[in-house]
Image: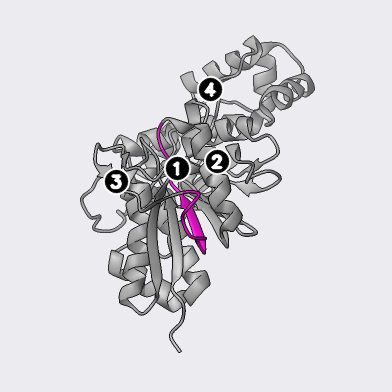
């Protein structure tokens, strides 16, 4: 007896990111070459074709109301979603499809559609690192995980930016058919089955918004001006003429972090920028204020799940790296 095909409905709309559609779709289509049975269908709110982010017209097979119940619903993202209210027609389409779906997933900013449809209430979720704060504001009952590549909460899945939709699709494939088939598809597509580190490795900064309080801005300016100087709690408090205890309270109240941790985050950002500009890891450690390469390596492991050397290899150039240099670069 032949197993029933697993239907994957992909909800699209004008301005959608093309890779949010094509990335996961290629994973499921490639799986079919190895014996899986996925049936892909593109759905728009009204059944009309939509214009993608790159200008290509994407035809839809059905509208959200008349489409068959998907075993898996995938909601793609779009650049306008974090900054604008979600179109009510798109919200209604997501609700209608999700009510009939076995599981619901979003790619990148598609999480804003799920959030607007009430599908993330009380759940854990993620989205592109640039927009996790906006998602948390828009969905206050949702626990947003900014570093996750993808998050599963029950039958609801959300993923980080753009290519993370491929990671999510591989995870769904592994749930359906096991790790062997998922591994074969990953190898065929020349992607990792599970990439090292979270999405923070791609972000521009870990510090978040600049502090509003003048005293805290003084601390930030002092560390950025001379990251290798003494920025212990006692030294910082003396510099801004408050007690160490009061300074700690101020940091916790506004930024929810200790002064020592904040100094590390600034130094970490500086080290990342130095690696990006071509410095080796030992130089980056010294110039950014870390006492040793080992302390920088531990910070990278905490924040990114990568060593400074691996980070530099991944982001410094598109030329394949010949291996670590003896100086720690």
Q: CA distance from mark 3 to mark 2?
A: 20 Å
* Helix, strand or loop under label 1: loop
Residue 317: within the magenta? Answer: no
Q: Earlier in the sequence, mark 4 or mark 1?
A: 1
Q: Earlier in the sequence, mark 2 or mark 1?
A: 1
| Residue underneath mark 4 | 223
User: In the figure, residue 255 lies in which quadrant?
Assistant: top right
| Residue underneath mark 1 | 45
Residue 134 left/right relative to 35: right
Report the mark closest to the observer, 4 or 2: 2
* Whole-percent x, y for residue 13 in the image: 40, 40
The residue carrying pointer 1 sits among few (fewer than 14), some (14 to 19) or many (20 or more) residues within 10 Å by Cα, namely many
* Helix, strand or loop under label 4: helix
Q: Which residues are magenta?
A: 64-79
Q: CA distance from mark 1 to mark 3?
A: 13 Å
| Residue underneath mark 2 | 92
Task: Say if mark 1 contacts mark 3, CB within 8 Å.
Answer: no
Q: CA distance from mark 4 to mark 1?
A: 51 Å
* Helix, strand or loop under label 3: strand
Q: Is residue 289 visible?
A: no
Q: Earlier in the sequence, mark 4 or mark 2?
A: 2
The residue carrying pointer 4 sits among few (fewer than 14), some (14 to 19) or many (20 or more) residues within 10 Å by Cα, namely many
* Whole-percent x, y for residue 234 in the image: 70, 24
Q: CA distance from mark 4 to mark 2?
A: 49 Å
Which numbered marker is on residue 58? 3
Task: Say if mark 4 contacts mark 1, CB within 8 Å.
Answer: no
User: Measuring 76% from the left and 23% from the top, which residue is drawn there?
Assistant: 249
User: Measuring 50% from the left and 49% from the top, which residue is drawn there?
Assistant: 65
* Whole-percent x, y for residue 288 in the image: 45, 32
User: Measuring 62% from the left and 34% from the top, which residue is drawn there?
Assistant: 136
């Amino acid at each position: 007896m032949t197993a029933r095909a697993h239907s994957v409905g992909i909800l699209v709309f004008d301005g959608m990111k093309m890779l949010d559609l094509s990335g996961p779709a290629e994973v499921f289509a490639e799986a079919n070459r190895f014996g899986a049975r996925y049936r892909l269908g593109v759905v728009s709110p009204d059944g009309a074709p939509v214009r993608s982010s790159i200008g290509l017209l994407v035809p839809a097979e059905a509208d959200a109301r008349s489409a068959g119940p998907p075993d898996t619903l995938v909601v793609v993202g779009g650049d306008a979603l974090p900054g604008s209210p979600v179109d009510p027609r798109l919200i209604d389409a997501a609700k209608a499809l999700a009510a009939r779906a076995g599981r619901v997933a979003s790619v990148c900013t598609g999480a804003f559609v799920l959030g607007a449809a009430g599908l993330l209430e009380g759940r854990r979720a993620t989205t592109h690192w640039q927009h996790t704060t906006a998602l948390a504001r828009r969905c206050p009952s949702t626990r947003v995980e900014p570093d996750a590549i993808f998050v599963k909460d029950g039958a609801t899945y959300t993923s980080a930016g753009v290519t993370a939709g491929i990671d999510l699709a591989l995870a769904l494939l592994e749930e359906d058919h096991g790790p062997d088939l998922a591994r074969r598809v990953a190898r065929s597509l020349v992607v990792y089955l599970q990439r090292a580190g979270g999405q923070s490795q791609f972000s521009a900064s870990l510090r978040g918004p600049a502090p509003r309080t003048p005293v805290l801005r003084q601390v930030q300016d002092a560390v950025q001006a001379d990251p290798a100087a003494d920025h212990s709690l006692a030294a910082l408090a003396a510099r801004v003429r408050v007690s160490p205890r009061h300074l700690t309270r101020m940091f916790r109240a506004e930024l929810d972090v200790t002064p020592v941790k904040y100094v590390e985050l600034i130094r970490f950002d500086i080290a990342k920028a130095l690696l990006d500009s071509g410095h080796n890891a030992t130089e980056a450690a010294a110039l950014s204020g870390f006492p040793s390469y080992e302390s920088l390596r531990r910070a990278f492991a905490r924040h990114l799940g990568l060593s400074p050397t691996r980070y530099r290899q991944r982001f410094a150039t598109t030329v394949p790296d010949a291996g670590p240099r003896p100086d720690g670069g």
